[in-house]
């Protein structure tokens, strides 16, 4: 286990199937369930929950090619009967990736920008 600066445990270096995913791969808008697949450092997949029941998957896939660089693919499956949740999920993941890429460039943005998430949720809702 790795301890963060705040002293909390984060299993970012050793996720395991059946355990909670690393905190930094989750957000408060898409409740995380147990890890369903891990192939470190390339793949992390976990269930996401709705009303405390697994209803889909969140999958992080990282690949690298010497000629084109790194690629990150983030996928969340959403059953048709929960399509109404898409705007908030899309907004949350967009903000999550914005924070991730800012951190890669040395800019740590805390706390979570809820205003940005709310703004994007409205935009995505208008498109659906």
Image (cartoon, helix red, strand yellow):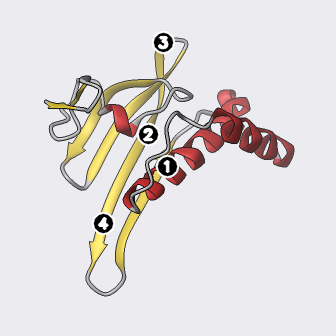
Who comes first in sequence, dot 4 or dot 3?
Answer: 3
Q: Which residue is mark 4?
A: 63
- Whether the residues at callouts 4 and 3 have beta carbons within 8 Å, the answer is no
Percent position of residue 82, x then y: 66, 28
- Left of 100 or right of it: where is 9? left
Location of the C terminus by quadrant is top right
Query: In terms of secondary structure, where does tag 1 sit?
Result: helix
Query: Is residue 65 or residue 80 the one in the foreground?
Result: 65
* Residue furthest top as drawn: 52
Percent position of residue 4, x then y: 25, 32
Query: In terms of secondary structure, where does tag 4 sit?
Result: strand
Q: Which residue is mark 1?
A: 99
- Whether the residues at callouts 3 and 2 have beta carbons within 8 Å, the answer is no
Q: Answer with the quarter of the image where residue 42 lies.
A: bottom left
Q: Residues within 10 Å of mark 1 (few under 14, many from 20)?
A: some
Disc 4 from disc 3: Cα separation: 32 Å
* Residue furthest bottom as drawn: 67
Who comes first in sequence, dot 1 or dot 4?
Answer: 4
Rendered image: mark on residue 58: 2
Q: Which residue is mark 3?
A: 52
Image depth: mark 1 or mark 2 in front: 1
The count of marks equals 4
Disc 3 from disc 2: Cα separation: 15 Å
Who comes first in sequence, dot 1 or dot 2?
Answer: 2
- Left of 47 or right of it: where is 4? left
């Amino acid at each position: 286990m790795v301890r963060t600066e705040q002293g909390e445990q984060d299993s970012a270096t050793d996720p395991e199937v059946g355990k909670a995913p690393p905190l930094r791969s989750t957000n408060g808008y898409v409740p995380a369930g147990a890890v369903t697949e891990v192939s470190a450092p390339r793949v992390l997949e976990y269930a996401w929950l709705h009303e405390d029941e697994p209803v889909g998957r969140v999958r992080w896939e990282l690949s690298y090619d010497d000629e084109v660089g790194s690629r990150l693919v983030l996928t969340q499956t959403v059953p048709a009967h929960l399509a109404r949740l898409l705007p908030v999920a899309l907004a949350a993941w967009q903000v999550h990736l914005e924070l991730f890429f800012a951190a890669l460039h040395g800019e740590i943005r805390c706390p979570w920008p809820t205003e940005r998430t709310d703004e994007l949720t409205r935009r995505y809702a208008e498109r659906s």
